[in-house]
Image (cartoon, rainbow, N blue to C red):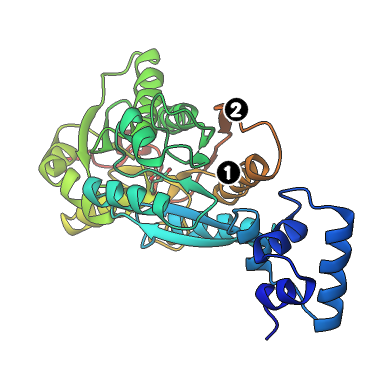
Amino acid sequence: MVSIADVAERAGVSPTTVSHALSGKRKVSDRVRARVEAAMRELGYVPSRSAQNLAIGRTRVLGLIVPDIRNSFFADLTHGVEATAIRHGYNVILCTTGFDHAREVDYLAMIRSRAVDGLVYAAGAPPTNSQLGALLGDLPLVLVDEEVPGANAPSFVSDNLDGGRLAAEHLLGLGHRRALVIAAEGGLVSSDLRVRGFQDSWAASGAEAPLVAAGAFTEEGGREAIGPHVEALRGEGITAVFAVNDLMALGAIGALQRAGIEVPGQVSVIGFDDIPAGRYAHPRLTTVRQDVDELGRRATTALIAALEEEPAARPDRHVLPVSLTARRSTAAPPTAQGKADNRG
Ligand code: RIB
């Protein structure tokens, strides 16, 4: 296979000069360029993309860090990022962190030392903003799904505050007045905003402040968070549960059903994401829908634009709308349905 070195020898120049003639990174004289092009023709040399990219200090590979691809939300986000990257001629290196802070920091440190041109980062247990800056240096970065407060990078997130409001207003509209919120532990901005949106809307109705439990952003996390409150849900008139993601909502529904509590007959449950598992659950899950494909597409397009155009991307916060998808896991509370109350 003809190499850059063969072309250089035939043209009587150095391999570096051939790389500069290929990349345009440094100017070469017309006479030298003519000798290089003649040598390429005579030898039948075809520059490989990796040679071209390396010649200009690029790999056309993007890093993608996400917390948990067992959660189809992140699987779909990964698909959206990769599909967009491939359309633009880039490949993707995927790292999953399991919401583990130490693992997340290790991957951030590793990704900078790997031949990637930039990073799309869906934080699960992020470092502080200053630590993030120290770990990544000047590596082009776009945040998706989860904000890192103070980070000097553009972010693409769903309107989590409005999503919490939509969940509250759906339940209030059905007649619920006492609720339990299942938040995600770890102080994630997405969860905090969903809970705040729900609480603000709930308070504005004059209803009693909801109970708040916390768990991991997983089905088990939802099951474990609701466990200590099952009796309150059975006997103290709490008739509604809002979980800050669908997996937690499905875990909570399973725990309620195992305790003999009907969903939605005795307790209504609403989630957040609109993952496929919720569409085929029993009962089918009411949820707040995120446009995960658009999140992935917008974040990746912004990163590639920052790599290929000037100036560097501004650290703007891009908020994508969410919508309510009402299904069978929510209904009017028992008393409003004329059924026996929760104590029955
Ligand atoms: O399901 C995972 C959750 O983590 C999603 O709601 C996503 O937005 C992030 O908050």
**Where residue 70 appears, x then y in whole percent?**
36, 63
Place residue 148 in its image quadrant. Answer: top left
Classify mark 2 as within 8 Å of ligand 1 or not, answering yes or no. Answer: no
Work out whether 258 lies above or below 100: below
Q: Mark 2 packing: few (<14 Cα in 10 Å), some, or many (20+)? A: few
**Where residue 104 appears, x then y in whole percent?**
30, 48
Residue visible at 35% across and 54% down in the picture: 110
Residue visible at 32% across and 25% down in the picture: 177
**Where residue 269 appears, x then y in whole percent?**
34, 44
Secondary element type, mark 2: loop
Residue on which disc 2 sits = 314
- For badge 2, the amino acid type reads Arg
Secondary element type, mark 1: helix
Q: Report the front residue among 253 and 59.
A: 59
Q: Quadrant of ligand 1?
A: top left
Label located before the other in sequence (2 or 1)? 1
User: Nearer the observer, disc 2 or disc 1?
Assistant: 2
Residue visible at 73% across and 66% down in the picture: 13
On the rendered image, what quadrant is the C terminus found in?
Answer: top left
Residue on which disc 1 sits = 299
Res 206 label: none
Residue visible at 81% across and 67% down in the picture: 36
